[in-house]
Amino acid sequence: MFKKAKNRLVKDKKMFIILFILSLIFIVYNVFFRGDETLALSKYGSRGSEVTQIQTKLKRWGYYTGSIDGIYGSQTLAAVKYFQRKNGLTVDGIAGTKTLQAMGIYTSSSSSSSSANNSSNLNLLARLVYGEARGEPYTGQVAVAAVVLNRVKSSSFPNTVSGVIYQAGAFSVVNDGQINLTPNQTAYNAARDALNGWDPSYGSIYYFNPNTATSSWIWSRPHVITIGNHRFCK
């Protein structure tokens, strides 16, 4: 009987070791291989203020048509996937760190300080400048960045840099993927100058290339200044 108890103890110990090892493997896999999903903060079934923020932003930008109830249901899931698909993100329906940052939602896990937020804004703005205005005069590149910042200040647009840039249909480089190109130093300098307050667009919230524009509406906007190939308007 003592032998049976001893064997059972040995088996239990082995089982504990196996379960412990499997737990470690699971943790390591999630940390190092699942990336954004590991840091997921909201997903199907979640509830709370973060879900409300997601729904509010996606509804404002035209991705979500349901009610803003703070419940991550099927409509919210579909809207998040739609946003991810349109903006070059992993289409998994999970509002992880990258997706939240693209929406302009920053939490303690995704941005621990205002400096991190500023760095994120600089990088995203530089990518927008590079995609939209590389080859334009330097002043014109700064003006493009300034338009984004002017929109952030306007009540008619999202109130974050990422929100403005990723607003549905706002910038062609988001739709064609050029937003993901690596910006050069000139684009970074232009973005930084705009963030520091230089606005060669004089408060403009729109710009377009008269040689390629197909919208008659954009021509109705009050003209402010033309720099290079871009016409800046209010």
Image: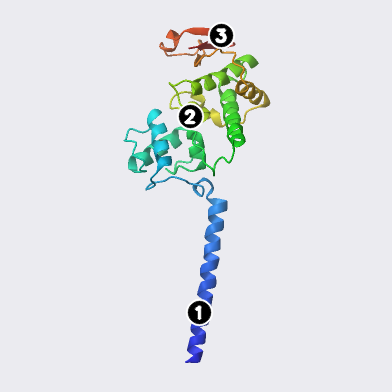
Label 1: how many residues lie within 10 Å, few (<14), some (14-19) or many (20+)?
few
- Amino acid at the residue labelled 2: Gly
What residue is pinned by disc 1?
11
Label 1 and label 2: CA atoms lie apart by: 56 Å
- Residue 181 in sight here: no
Q: Secondary structure at mark 3?
A: strand
| Circle 2: element type | helix
Tell me residue 195's x, y (percent).
60, 23
* Residue hosting label 3: 226
Residue at x 59% of width, y 15% of height: 199
Residue 160 location in percent, x, y?
50, 28
Give the mark, 3 or 1, whose residue is nearer the N terminus: 1
Marks 3 and 1 sit apart, C-alpha to C-alpha, by 79 Å
Which of discs 3 and 2 lies nearer the camera? The answer is: 2
Q: Quadrant of residue 198?
A: top right
Give the residue type at disc 1.
Lys
Crowding around mark 2 (Cα neighbors within 10 Å: few <14, some 14 to 19, many 20+) is: many
Q: Which mark is residue 163?
A: 2
The label nearer to you, 1 versus 2, is 2
Answer with mark 3 or mark 2, whichever residue precedes in sequence.
Answer: 2
Q: In the figure, 102 relative to 220: above or below?
A: below
